[in-house]
Amino acid sequence: MAICRTSAAVYGKRVPRLWTDTIEQHRRAVRDATIDATAALVAEHGLNAVTMSGIAEKTGIGRATLYKYFPDVEAVLLAWHERQIATHLAHLVEARDHARSPGERLPAVLRAYAVLAHQRHDPDLTALLHRDEHASRARRHLHGLLCDLLTDDVHAGRIRSDVPVDELAGYCVHALAAAGELRSAAAVRRLVSVTLAGLRP
C-alpha cells in the first residue's frame, strides 16, 4: 500500500505514458511470441497434439502467465488466424497498388490470391478457423475488393458485362480456391489463366 501511495505522489496519480507504452509493448511481444510458438507447434505436430503446457514451454513463459493472455489453445489459434488474415488482405491490396497498369490490377490480385490459396494447412485447423467471425469479415472484404476491380474493368470493356460483378467476384473466389488442391506453381498459374479467360467479354 505504501508503494502505491508513493507512486501516486511521484506521478501525480497518473502513470507516465512512457511506462504504459512500455507495458503495452511487452504485452504485444508476449502475445506475438505465444502466437508464433503455437503456429510452429501446429506445423510440427498437428493441431490435436498442441497443449497449453506445450505452448508455455515453447514460448518460455509460465502457464499462469499464458492463461492471462489466452484461455485455451483455440483462442491462441484464432488470434493467429486474425493476424494471418490481416497480412493476407494487406498483401492483396499491395498487389493491386503495385500493378503496372489499371488492366493489370485484377490479374495481379487474382494471382496473389491463388498463391495464398495454394498454401496448405492442417485440415483440422482449417475447419476450426474458417468458421470464425474474422474469416467471415475477410471474405466480405475480399469480395468487395474484387467487385471494385471488376466494376472498373467492366467499364473499361476488359471484363464481360452480361453477368453482375457480384456473381463474377464469387466465381473468382470459388474457382481459385481450387489452388489449394494443386501440386505445383505452374498448375496454379494455369488455374489463374483459366479463371481470367472466363471473365473476358
Image (spheres, grey):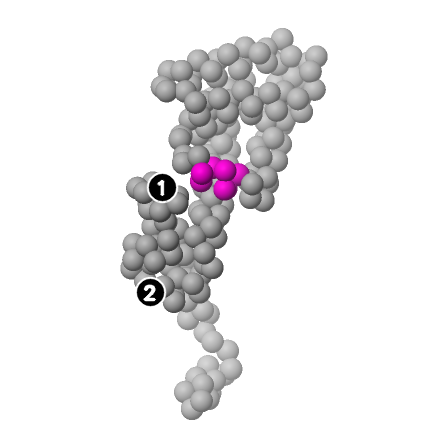
Graded by Cα atoms within 10 Å as few (under 14), some (14 to 19) or many (20 or more), the crowding at tag 1 reads: some
* Residue 60 coordinates in the image, percent (x, y): 29, 59
**Nearer to me, 10 or 81:** 81
Query: Can the viewer see residue 101?
Result: no
Q: Is residue 160 left or right of residue 131?
A: right
**Nearer to me, 106 or 49:** 49
Q: Is residue 111 above or below residue 133?
A: above
The chief SS type of the magenta part is helix
Q: Which residue is mark 2?
A: 62
Q: Is residue 28 left or right of residue 158?
A: left
Q: Which residue is mark 1?
A: 46
Q: Residue at coordinates 32% horizontally, 43% vertically from top-left? A: 45
Query: Can the viewer see residue 179?
Result: yes
Quarter of the image where the N terminus is located: bottom left
Residue sitting farthest toward the bottom: 2
* Residue 39 coordinates in the image, percent (x, y): 37, 45
Q: Residue at coordinates 32% horizontally, 54% vertically from top-left? A: 54
Is disc 1 placed on a helix, strand or loop? loop
User: Which amino acid type corresponds to the residue marked 1 in the rendered image?
Assistant: Gly
Q: Could you tell me if the residues under marks 2 and 1 are in contact, i.e. CB atoms within 8 Å?
A: no
Q: Is residue 50 left or right of residue 167?
A: left
Q: Residue at coordinates 65% horizontally, 17% vertically from top-left? A: 154
Residue sitting farthest toward the top: 201
Q: Residue at coordinates 29% horizontally, 54% vertically from top-left? A: 58
Q: Is residue 174 above or below residue 57?
A: above
Location of residue 27 by image quarter? bottom left
Spatial separation of the CA atoms under disc 2 and disc 1: 22 Å
Is disc 2 placed on a helix, strand or loop? loop
* Residue 170 coordinates in the image, percent (x, y): 61, 24
User: Which amino acid type corresponds to the residue marked 2 in the rendered image?
Assistant: Gly
Q: Is residue 12 above or below residue 198?
A: below
Q: Which residues are magenta?
A: 124-130
